[in-house]
Image (cartoon, grey):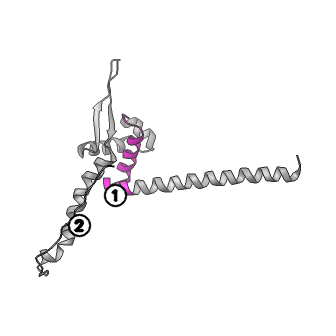
Amino acid sequence: MSADQSTEGSAESTDEDDSDGAADCAVSEFDDGLVDLLAWILDTETRARIYVHLRQHPHSTSEEVAEGTGLYPSTVREALAELADDETVERRKRKSSGAGNNPYEYVAIAPSDLVKGVSGQVQAQLNAVFNLDRHLGTDRSDETEPVTITVREE
């Protein structure tokens, strides 16, 4: 093999490595953006990371979620209890054939259900802002159009 062929081969593998790195970076930025958006919807980044993990790994226990997310087990248990209270995750006992403690397992609701729940809150807040002048008594018009948010699954 000539020196030129050796150089070309290494240049090709470098290009492939660069494209893999760029793809990993793009996926990471997408994941970070998604987690940021979910953190806004779910109140904290911790809850967002747990939600994403449960969408990827349904029927996980709190220990499995802690291991998969890198969060402290006590933090995960507390966040899962809050998410269950908010009906963002469903909780049920894991069935096992042996004797002993059957831990809870968790499943996150579908993203469309999550959006439907949030859209009503956002709509109410937008309408409050939209009608601010009316509430302050500075708006003389009688006609105000409310903000309506409709979520459809396609």
Q: Tag on residue 30? A: none
Label 1 neighbour load within 10 Å: few <14, some 14-19, many 20+: few
Q: Does the magenta stretch include residue 54?
A: yes
Give the residue drawn at x 88%, y 46%: 1
Name the residue tied to disc 1.
40
Q: What is the distance, in whole Å, between disc 2 and disc 1 at their CAs?
A: 16 Å
Give the residue drawn at x 25%, y 57%: 150
Image-quadrant location for residue 104? top left
Bounds of the magenta span? 37-59
> Could you tell whether 113 is left or right of 21 in the image?
left
Q: Are marks 2 and 1 in contact (CB under 8 Å)?
A: no
Judged by its main secondary structure, the magenta piece is helix
Image-quadrant location for residue 139? bottom left
> Could you tell whether 12 is left or right of 103 in the image?
right
Q: Position of residue 9 (x, y in %)?
A: 78, 49
Q: Where is residue 117 in the image (x, y as percent from the top left)?
A: 25, 51
SS for callout 1: helix
Asked whether 153 or 91 is in front, the reply is: 153
Label 2 neighbour load within 10 Å: few <14, some 14-19, many 20+: some
Furthest-top residue in this view: 98
Image-quadrant location for residue 65? top left
Q: Does the magenta stretch include residue 2?
A: no
Asked whether 2 or 50 is in front, the reply is: 2
Asked whether 147 or 70 is in front, the reply is: 147
Name the residue tied to disc 2.
126
SS for callout 2: helix
**Mark found first going from the N terminus, 2 or 1:** 1
The mark total stands at 2
